[in-house]
Amino acid sequence: AGPQLIAGADVAASAPALSSLYQAWAERRPVSFDYRSASSEAEARTVEPYGLLQRRGHWYLVGRDRAREDIRSFKVSRVVSDVELLEGSFEPPEDLDLTSHMQTEAWEIGSEDPATAVVRFSAGIRWWAEQNMAHLTQREGPEGALEIELPVANDDALLSWAIGFGDSVEIVAPERLRTRLLEHIGPFLEGDG
C-alpha cells in the first residue's frame, strides 16, 4: 500500500502545518515539529507521516513517532512550530489502516454489548452534529432537528456527554438509555415549576 490521504473536506484547510505535512507524506520523508498534546507542554516530535485524514472537522497526521517507536495520531492544529522536512525516507507498513490509529469516543469503549443509539440534535445545535459527526448515519428529525446514529458500548459515557448539551440534545433510542437520561435529569426538572 502506498501513501494514503483520506479527506472529508477541502484540503485547503486553515492549519498552516498541513501543506508541509502533505509534502512530507507524498515524498515519504520524516518530519520534526513541536507538538502540544491535550494534557502537556509542547515537545519536539519526529514522525514518519503515514497519512493525513480529517475527522469531525479536524485534520490529523497518522505516523510512526520515532522516539516512542509507535504509530500515533497527531491533531494538526496542535502543531505549534514550523514543520521541518528531514533527510531520508521510509516505507509505511503494508495494509496500514489509518483510522484504526485514531482515538475513539468514550461511549464507543466499554464492556457493555455494543448497541446503536439515536440522538436528536435540536435545530439550533444541529450544525455541530453536521460538522463533527458527518461520518455517522444522519436523518432529518422533527421541527428541523437532526438525528444521528451512534455506536454505544458505554451507556454512562453517552449519558454524560448528552447531558452536557442541556436541552439541545435528546436520546431517542434505545428506550433504556432514554429512561436513564430522564432519571438523571428528572430531579432538576422537578424544581422547575
Image (cartoon, rainbow, N blue to C red):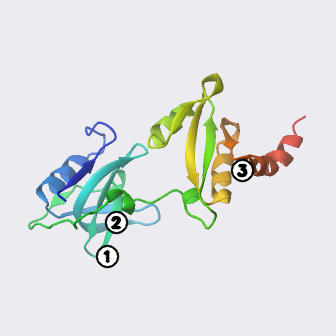
Residue 118, image x, y percentages: 62, 42
As drawn, the label of residue 177 is: 3
Q: Which of the 4 image quarters holds residue 140?
A: top right
Give the residue type that dot 1 points to: Arg
- Labels 2 and 1 touching (C-beta < 8 A): yes
As drawn, the label of residue 68 is: 1
Residue 16, image x, y percentages: 26, 46
As drawn, the label of residue 94 is: none
Which of the two discs, 3 and 1, labels the residue nearer the N terminus?
A: 1
**What number of labels is visible?**
3
Q: Residues within 10 Å of mark 1 (few under 14, many from 20)?
A: few
32 over 121 or under it: above or below? below
65 over 167 or under it: above or below? below
Q: Is residue 156 left or right of residue 3?
A: right
Give the residue type that dot 3 points to: Leu
Give the residue type that dot 2 points to: Arg
Residue 166, image x, y percentages: 69, 41
Q: Secondary structure at mark 2?
A: strand
Which residue: 33% across, 38% down?
A: 9
Which of the two discs, 3 and 2, labels the residue nearer the N terminus?
A: 2
For the residues labelled 3 and 1, the Cα–Cα distance comes to: 40 Å
Using the image as rendered, state which of residue 50 and residue 115 is in the foreground: 115
86 over 168 or under it: above or below? below
Q: Label 2 belongs to which residue?
A: 72
Q: Is residue 173 left or right of residue 16?
A: right
Q: Secondary structure at mark 1?
A: loop
For the residues labelled 2 and 1, the Cα–Cα distance comes to: 9 Å
Q: Quadrant of the C terminus?
A: top right
Q: Residues within 10 Å of mark 2 (few under 14, many from 20)?
A: some
Please identify, in this view, whether the residue under mark 3 or under mark 2 is nearer the observer: 3
Q: Is residue 17 visible?
A: no
